[in-house]
């Protein structure tokens, strides 16, 4: 499969399953799948493009699972999803104009702040909180900023959407998770639409990973709905911290 041995493909499928499971609960699945693709020998651009393909299946599955359970209304969220897709596509197109090295320095600090917020903020639960930003303002500010970041760089996108929904939109943790997945699905599609014409997507590898990514996302979403904030909150803290440590490691050791 594009020069990859079957045992490597199976390991990639395992990584996709774990990534889909974690991502459907708290985001951060790319922390597992992108390094796996790079370790398999894919060049960085091909790894990112292929990751967007398989990740789209996971985020889409999670979004559909949450929607079927009534935690999110896809029709009502379509305008935000469209903004997310367009902003992610724009982020992917201008990636070469901005410094990814600067983001690698800034993002660990931001991710540690996200982890600290969910770890130590009192009163975080599945209950809705005070709304600090109107939906229209949220859609025109937070959504395009986070989605553009996803198209350009990526790590922590789900965590940033989650924090925005909880802190600014006033959502409970489970509701925030459900709404995050649809926006993440849209940003994946927007980025993928930019990668496809470049020929960077390894389709067979991506579809193989998509099979297990879908299963992992479905199981993760089901578990998150059963346990709620008691599961989502600690996993979000762990994944945000892990992403920050990984970015620090990259910044120091390349």
Image (spheres, grey):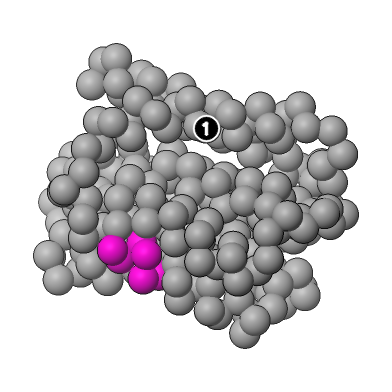
Residue 177 or 66: which is nearer the viewer?
177
Q: Main secondary structure of the magenta part?
A: helix
Picture layout, residue 57 above or below residue 35: below
**Which residue is painted at 57% across and 45% down in the image?**
159
Is residue 89 shown in magenta? yes
Residue 172 point in image, percent of width and height? 79, 54
Residue 178 or 1: which is nearer the viewer?
178
**Which residue is painted at 45% across and 67% down in the image?**
84
Secondary structure found at label 1: helix
Is residue 161 shown in magenta? no
Residue 14 point in image, percent of width and height? 45, 46
Residue 16 or 48: which is nearer the viewer?
48
Q: Is residue 220 visible?
A: no
- The magenta stretch is 85-90
Position of residue 191 in the picture relative to residue 83 (left or right): left
Pick the quarter of the image with the C terminus.
Answer: top left
Position of residue 17 in the picture relative to residue 154 (left or right): right
Q: Which residue is mark 1?
A: 111
Residue 47 or 205: which is nearer the viewer?
47
């Amino acid at each position: 499969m594009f020069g990859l041995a079957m045992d490597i493909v199976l390991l990639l499928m395992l990584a996709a399953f774990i990534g889909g499971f974690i991502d459907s609960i708290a985001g951060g699945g790319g922390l597992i799948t992108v390094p796996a693709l790079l370790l398999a020998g894919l060049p960085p651009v091909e790894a990112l493009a292929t990751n967007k393909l398989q990740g789209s299946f996971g985020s889409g599955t999670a979004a559909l699972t949450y929607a079927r359970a009534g935690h999110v209304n896809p029709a009502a969220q379509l305008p935000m999803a469209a903004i997310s897709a367009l902003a992610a596509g724009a982020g992917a197109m201008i990636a070469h104009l901005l410094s990814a090295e600067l983001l690698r320095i800034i993002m660990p600090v931001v991710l540690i702040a996200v982890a600290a917020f969910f770890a130590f903020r009192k009163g975080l639960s599945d209950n809705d909180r005070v709304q600090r930003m109107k939906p229209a303002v949220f859609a025109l500010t937070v959504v395009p900023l986070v989605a553009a970041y996803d198209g350009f760089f990526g790590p922590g996108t789900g965590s940033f959407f989650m924090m925005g929904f909880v802190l600014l939109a006033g959502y409970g943790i489970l509701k925030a998770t459900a709404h995050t997945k649809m926006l993440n699905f849209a940003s994946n599609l927007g980025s993928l639409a930019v990668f496809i014409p470049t020929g960077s997507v390894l389709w067979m590898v991506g579809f193989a990973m998509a099979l297990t990514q879908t299963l992992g996302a479905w199981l993760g979403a089901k578990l998150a709905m059963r346990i709620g904030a008691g599961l989502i909150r600690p996993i979000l803290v762990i994944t945000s911290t892990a992403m920050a440590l990984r970015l620090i490691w990259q910044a120091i050791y390349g």
